[in-house]
Image (spheres, helix red, strand yellow):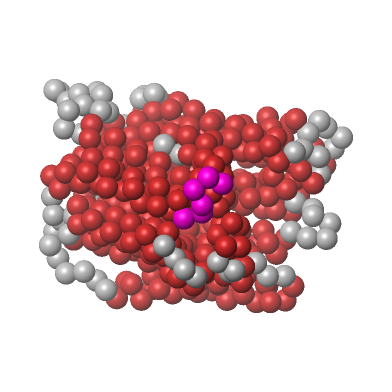
Amino acid sequence: MNLADPVDAPTGVSEKLFAPGRSAACIGAVALISMLAFESIAVATAMPAVAEALNGLPYYALAFGATLATSVLGMTAAGQLCDKRGPYRAALAGLAAFLAGLLLAGFASSMPVLVLGRAMQGLGSGVLGVTLYVGVGQVVPQHLHPKLFAMFAGAWVVPGLVGPALASFFVQWFGWRSVFLAVAAAVPVAAALMLPALRRVGSGTGEELRWGAMRWALLASIGALTLHSASQQTGTSSALLFAAGLAAAGIAARLLLPAGTMRAARGLPTVILLRGLIAATFASAEAFLPLMLTQHFGWSLTQAGIALSAGAVTWSLGSAVQARVHKPEARRLLLPAGFTLTALALTVVIAPLLFALPSALVLVGWIGVGLGIGLSFPILSVLLLKLSPPEQQGSNTSSLQLCDALTSSAALALAGLLFDPVTRQVLPVLLLALALVSVAALLSPRAQPGA
């Protein structure tokens, strides 16, 4: 049997994702992902009010960059913790760091203290992102993994739709601190649901942790932070920071990612590379889509927000569709089909910039982008766990998310270099996104481990 093919349900194993014995873990995972999603979206909405209240505008970009940088450290540490100590201990560490960061930020008296809290949140969310994949992936039988990762994708939809409005409500009526403290209040609930199931998974191999890998994770973190800083600058300084950040991230990636990732070796290395390419595609295109709609086509911010929400909904729809495809031949076609659909849909998004076409095509194209990514994104997670021995699922999941973070940082920094703030021309950025997903579509057949 090809490792990339779906696994038939073992006799006597329930086909229901929320069957007894795993329902609490699944509910807890959905709650935790929704919480992480809401925190990310709500904090971005509330941060202007936070910076004004704490007189911290000089630290504004660092409040986001610090979270990204420490999440890279958290991903690397979580990979080892899951493999060598088990997902339960890793989840405990991640929840503790995330909760401490929320409380530190919620009670911060100055912007530097808030940045420290944001750094703790990034560390915790990096650990939890890996732990959720590994721990819940081991609780849920392999043949249900397509449904599991479709559920993970769906957990982002509601926070994406209501997060900005709910965060604005909290800031207006209860103050900006309530955004952090409300999320902190939800952490124990998600933990109580999920931790008992993770405790039953096991404790790993018990081998000693390889702390040497953390040195390269620190270099990757510095690279990600430098790339983030490059996107905040202009001119020569931006180009220099981009080159330095890309070099640091590239060196660290070669040492932290599985051998062959950079050259798209067949199987697991290509799966990890494809995750980075599709994440970078979406990050760079989504960041500049509202600007294109408002500046070039005269849409309101509300209309642009609806376009982004429509993409989030079709992402969830695409994830649900792939979960219902069970035939091996059909599932092998889903990954290249998803990437190809995303590339074609991005072409539709770009078309009104080049030709005298209605701007409504941008919305149509973005709906297609969400659908295409929804089809392909969960399949990469399913393939990763299938191609990873149990004792390496933590480190390989860490690599998957690390590649996601580093390529997205590099793509956003390069988009900042390509974007001209004077003319506000976004076409080069969208062409970058189209090039990334086109490369992914060409490489996608190599994700299968071979005959």
- State the quadrant of the N terminus: top left
Where is residue 59? Give x, y as percent.
57, 70
Whether residue 265 sits left or right of residue 279 in the image: it is left
The answer, for residue 279, to whether it is visible in the render is: no
Q: Residue at x 36, y 51 (%)?
A: 184
Whether residue 308 sits left or right of residue 188 in the image: it is right
Magenta stretch, overall SS? helix
Where is residue 441? Give x, y as percent.
55, 43
User: What residue range appears in magenta?
Assistant: 172-177
The answer, for residue 245, to whether it is visible in the render is: yes
The relative height of residue 271 versus residue 310 in the rendered view (above or below) is below
Q: Residue at x 47, y 34 (%)?
A: 158
Q: Is residue 174 magenta?
A: yes
The relative height of residue 249 versus residue 163 in the rendered view (above or below) is below
Whether residue 116 sits left or right of residue 242 in the image: it is left
- Image quadrant where residue 214 sits: bottom left
Residue furthest right as drawn: 356
Q: Nearer the viewer, residue 411 or 72?
A: 72
Q: Residue at x 31, y 41 (%)?
A: 29
The relative height of residue 409 versus residue 221 in the rendered view (above or below) is above
Where is residue 43? Give x, y as percent.
51, 53
Whether residue 34 sits left or right of residue 336 in the image: it is left
Q: Is residue 109 magenta?
A: no
Q: Nearer the viewer, residue 258 or 275?
A: 275
- Total numbered badges shown on the rendered structure: 0
The relative height of residue 37 versus residue 124 in the rendered view (above or below) is above
Q: Residue at x 38, y 70 (%)?
A: 217
Where is residue 221? Give x, y as percent.
45, 69
